[in-house]
Image (spheres, rainbow, N blue to C red):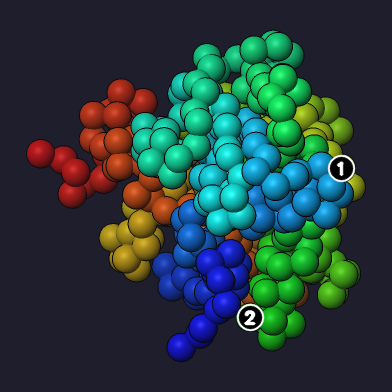
Amino acid sequence: MITVPDTLSLIGNTPLVRLAGPSEAAGCEIYGKCEFANPGASVKDRAALWIVRDAEKRGILKPGGTIVEGTAGNTGIGIALVANALGYKTVIVMPETQSREKMDTLRALGAELVLVPAAPFSNPGHFVHTSRRIAEETENAVWANQFDNVANRRAHIESTAPEIWEQMAGKIDGFTCAVGTGGTLAGVGLGLKEKDEAVTIALSDPHGAALYNYYACGELKAEGSSVAEGIGQGRITGNLDGAPVDTQYRISDQDGLEWVRRLLADEGLCLGLSSGINVAGAILLGRELSGKLGRPARVATILCDTGFRYLSSLYNAEWLRAKDLPVFPWLES
Ligand code: PMP
């Protein structure tokens, strides 16, 4: 059993699990990094910890200060936990379209929650701009700025990537994930390339995001839409700048949801939709790399957060029907 000296040391060092169904479907080895095992139940705990520690080091976050952030939810949950552990206050600005569970969780953790209508990034009312303004207007406050603050991707360069490398004993051919801020894709990509330039880094983009077209043909252009929370980016964020993306896939909600269903029904993993989209992408990357290498490839991806965060959406028959998405058979009745 592992013993750690304090609660913040519980962030990271998550297990890597071989996924049987996806491995069989791809004809190679597919592994998932269990980021739902972090204390805040998502990959964003790492970014939260690195951003807060970076602000302390730069002297902009003072004792008793306030951390303000705009987030789809998971970063806010990570920041609230880290802030509680270090004696800071938290103000979270979130679009009102995000899951009920994330809002309830943020309130339960003691964060001050500010809900704003969903708006395009160009609108000054967008949650990111609102959070920047609140930080500017609040005394002794810092703006975490997860999209453009590269302390976010440093978390993955310094922790997630070396963990994956060690857990796969240096035998890894490819890595893929979707993008919210881009911290995970760019950070793990850069960290793995530092170990071995030959590791292929792939973007798995949901519909409605602009990055697939950007990496495929240099044009930031979105098509379609997705109900996935926390992913789907329309610009090159500071964290994405210089990301080593070798190839890209576009994954539908239907394909992502099918893997959410199968991983729960067949392997006992309850995940959010971004994890399903990542696994669908990992299967495509695994097949492509196995073909190129002439042997079964070894591919890793991120299992971003727990499905318990989406009981009123992904795991709710009425919600799924309203979105025209297939309902898990055990929810039908
Ligand atoms: N999945 C979920 C559920 C998330 O909340 C996020 C973060 N917004 C991501 C994936 C994407 O992570 P990143 O911000 O590192 O791109």
| Position in image of residue 5 (x %, y %) | 57, 77
- Disc 2 element: helix
- Amino acid type assigned to the residue bearing label 2 in the image: Gln
Asked whether, in this view, residue 7 is left or right of residue 172, the answer is: left
Q: Residue at x 77, y 29 (%)?
A: 235
- 308, above or below 268, in the image: above
Q: Residues within 10 Å of mark 1 (few under 14, many from 20)?
A: few
Asked whether, in this view, residue 318 is left or right of residue 23, the answer is: left
Q: Residue at x 48, y 60 (%)?
A: 39
Q: Which circle's residue, 1 or 2, is located before the other in the chain?
A: 2
Residue at the extreme bottom of the image, as rendered: 1
Q: Residue at x 65, y 43 (%)?
A: 64
Is residue 258 in view? Answer: no
Residue at which label 2 appears: 167
Quadrant (top left/top right/bottom left/bottom right) for the C terminus: top left
- Amino acid type assigned to the residue bearing label 1 in the image: Asp
Q: Residues within 10 Å of mark 2 (few under 14, many from 20)?
A: some
Is residue 89 in view? Answer: yes
Q: Are marks 1 and 2 in contact (CB under 8 Å)?
A: no
- Image disc number at residue 16: none
Camera-side residue: 76 or 33?
76
Residue at the extreme left of the image, as rendered: 333
- Image disc number at residue 241: 1
Residue 123: image quadrant is top right
Camera-side residue: 102 or 256?
102
- 126, above or below 270, in the image: above
